[in-house]
Image: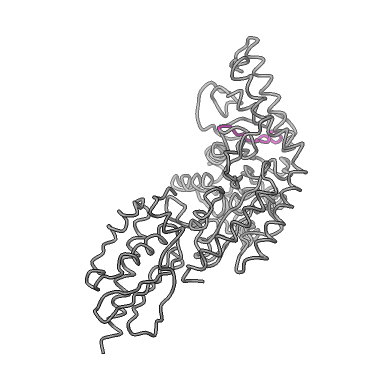
Amino acid sequence: MEYSKEVMERYNNPKNVGVLDDNDKNVGTSVVGAPSCGDVIKLQLKVDENGKISEAKFKAFGCGAAIASSALITEWVQGKSLEEAEGIKNREVAEYLSLPPVKAHCSVLAEEAVRKAIKNYQDKNKA
Amino acid sequence: MSSGVIYMDYQATTPCDRRVLEEMLPFFLEDFGNPHSKHIMGRKAKDAIEDARKKIADLIKASDPKEIIFTSGATESNNLTIQGVARFHKTKGRRIITSAIEHKCVLETFQALKRDGFDVVVVPVLQNGIVDMQVLEDSINDETILVSIMTVNNEIGVIQPIEQISEICRKNNVLFHSDAAQAVGKINVDASQVDLMSISSHKIYGPKGVGALYIRLNPRVQLSPLFYGGGQEQGLRSGTLPTPLCVGLGKACAIAQEEMRSESKRLAEFRDYFLKKIFDNLGKVHLNGDAKCCIPGCINLSFEGIEGEGIMLGMPDICMSSGSACTSDLLQPSYVLKAISVREDLAHSSLRIGFGRFTTFDEVDYASSKIIEVVNRLRAMSPLW
């Protein structure tokens, strides 16, 4: 697979690999994809008192495109409000990374991971 | 090898051996005659081709060089056999049998014949990759005209019990074909055990674009040709023979005959060293296929928690392949690993490492260290680890 410089950079030196404390009510967590499909992304967001994402961490099982898509989206969501983060489209991720068409689903997964993590944070803080 | 690149994909193809190339060269430039011409140039080419035919026959222990015909490669040999036998014998019966882990060119030919009304049976394999002999035997009925089972699998290197399958077929008076593309030149094969056998050149350090088919003469196996023309190769494969390619395949077989034993011993040592180092340094690694009944140069491993294409990306200087969906154009994981009941996530986690004639110990050592390093790095960022 021929990948862009942006993909290789994030595959070789991904920022934001790691986990946040799931018990923290300011942390939203999502796990998307399935091992049987060859892609799983775990994504966590920490939201500060101003409603902005102060920290984002990920772990990924998958190909170079899956790792790079999840790494990139954790870079992008930091400092954003939840609305802004939800507005990130998979197409933007795919374009930035110049993903080949067969790898578009990796960016879809990354977008889904952000939305589900936000939802998880909101569900936690409903009460 | 191109500088700095380590080639460990010998099941995909092999480089042409320099000795093979040198034997071929005169037939491009000076001795270019059409082997079917009756003048001196033609005879020279024909003599060289007959010599090559004999070398192939010798390697697979065929009793007569006439039992060998040249084709463009194993894909054509397999197509010619399966389509040719099915067409010729269709009035006798319509059942044709193969296994679940054959090469695509066999499986797809069977599927095409199924669409034409043939009764296709695909026999499953056991978890170690060996054909389920009971199911095979039970699948043979009065309508059965052909059994096609590969000698060595191209993904997991497993060797099938050809002698036993042969006995079952003989007992039932059914033709037995084996795709031996991955076996010839690597292990002893014996043409007396089969009725037809497919051979590839570029898997055994010969040139690409040529292969052969063994067709038993006594009793004579009858089949229809795939295409028509000047009636070369006993009317089974029309078209001018490519002299340099045929000569190359012959030389490749002669070298294999000489060196197979020492080569396979060396590769077995590499394999043992490689596997020990991997298993000593990494947990949760699975060997796919049969640990003993396999060719030494083919190793298929699954690394829990990480994905195959991701591993390959971490060592761009080493050429290997993976059964992961991400490395296939159809985004499907390997059907061979599926057939041997490898868990789907572990199919995605697989890596095929192929050693061959030009592999060195230093390369094996470097590749194993690199794999350990990349696997550890990727596992540290895996949510499944």
Residue placed at 54% from the left, 49% from the top?
B95
Query: What colour scheme has been applied to the protein in the rendered image?
Result: one colour
Determine if the magenta segment contains residue A34.
no
Q: Which residues are magenta?
A: B209-220
Left or right of B178, for residue A11: left
Q: Residue at x 39, y 50 (%)?
A: A4
User: Is residue A26 placed above or below B302 in the rendered structure?
Assistant: below
Q: Nearer the viewer, residue B265 or B70?
A: B265
- Say which quadrant the N terminus of chain B sits in: top right
Residue lying at 61% horizontally and 18% vertically, measured from the top left? B35
B212 or A27, nearer to the observer? A27
Residue B189 in picture, x, y percent from top left:
72, 43
Give residue B40's position: percent from left, percent from top.
65, 10
Q: How many marks?
A: 0
The image shows residue B281, relative to residue B266, as above or below, that is below
Q: Residue furthest bottom?
A: A127
The residue at 44%/44% (across/down) is B116
Horizontal and vertical percent position of residue B349: 52, 61
- Whole-percent x and y of residue B332? 45, 56
Q: Quadrant of residue B216?
A: top right
